[in-house]
Image: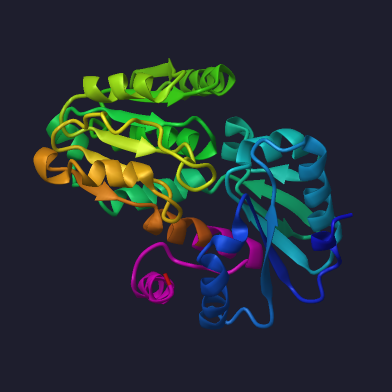
Amino acid sequence: MKEQFQAAEKPTMYFIGVTTSKSSINKIFPLWAERLELGSCQLKGIDFQLHDQPELYREAVKFIKGDPLSRGALVTTHKMDLCDACRDIFDALDPLSDSMEEVSSIFKRGGKLHGRAVDPISSGLALQAFLPRDHWKATNAEAYIMGAGGSAVALTWYLVQLRHGVNRPSKVHVANLGRPRLNHLRELHASWKSGVPLECHLVNEPGDADAILQSLKPSSLVVNATGLGKDAPGSPITDGAKFPANSLVWEFNYRGDLVFLRQAEAQKAAKNLTIEDGWIYFVHGWTRGIADVFDVDIPTQGSAFDDLARIAASVR
């Protein structure tokens, strides 16, 4: 067993990612733990390669399940791979996690190991923080999500929900390098019966993604959910890509060499772009994960949430 899987000596939350030591959460977590009165506890990172070996994911989840002081984990990047490898280890998966086949929050209740998909909630909360009110209704714009991993699936689910009424994108485009995840998303989308068209694009090179970008209506939402810029170098588009006028550009990453963000910034004035990085998504995602793991109530808005956001921003 890896050294990082030695028995915890105090209540421990794990962070399963790719480059966990570089995340701001390592500085933020102790401050949040103090503010939330969690007592003596710690956060530990577990790094895996992209699409790592299933047995490595299983080793980590089995360890968390069996170790008394290991309380749970937040999963980034590996949500779908981990779920696929470890389904039988969980005692319970929430309905969204089960249907989307992804796990982003691992926690224990009554001696049982639970898996939950928090991204459908946290991505929606983060989007609403910068999306103008009734944006889709007013513009008839589209959404273009590059990447088809867990975060992309979660955002697609949120965008097409019937509860939004007519305030939904006129079409959702999703582009990805691999076909299997696009096929999976296409099947999920059909099961949601949303009425919002979904167009899946297999892209072989950044120039393919550029062409989709250029075809979008004005005021569309453009999202980098590929991990490029953080988990791997580069951007899903080229420097020659042209953003639609008045569009909203969302880079899911908040750290790393954010090439996609710089590409958008270069066109901000000429195209009247609204540009957002992944910081507020990071805050919502982590507060949901901590709420699960430590079984505490953390609101998603109001003064208590604002306090946590301010604490996080102070060490960003």
Q: Residue drawn 39% across and 70% down?
A: 309
Give the left or right position of residue 102, taking residue 306 as reference.
right
Q: In this orientation, which residue lies closer to the viewer: 218 or 104?
A: 218
- Colouring convention used in this rendered image of the protein: rainbow
Q: Position of residue 209 (x, y in %)?
A: 36, 23
Q: Residue drawn 70% across and 40% down?
A: 82
Q: In this orientation, which residue lies closer to the viewer: 303 or 35?
A: 35
**Does the segment drawn in magenta span residue 296?**
yes
Q: Residue furthest right?
A: 1
Predominant SS along the magenta part: helix
In the image, residue 238 above or below residue 75: above
Counting every numbered tag in the picture gives: 0
**Does the segment drawn in magenta span residue 173?**
no
In the image, residue 309 above or below residue 277: below
Q: Where is residue 172, by image quadrant?
A: top left
Say if residue 195 shows up in the picture: no
Give the left or right position of residue 249, taking residue 140 as reference.
right
Magenta residues, start to end: 287-315
Q: Position of residue 175 (x, y in %)?
A: 42, 24
In the image, residue 310 above or below residue 193: below
Say if residue 33 shows up in the picture: yes
Q: Quadrant of the C terminus?
A: bottom left
Q: Position of residue 220 (x, y in %)?
A: 22, 32
Q: In this orientation, which residue lies closer to the viewer: 168 or 246?
A: 246
Q: Quadrant of the N terminus?
A: bottom right
Q: Residue drawn 52% across and 60% down?
A: 286
Q: In this orientation, which residue lies closer to the viewer: 123 or 108?
A: 123
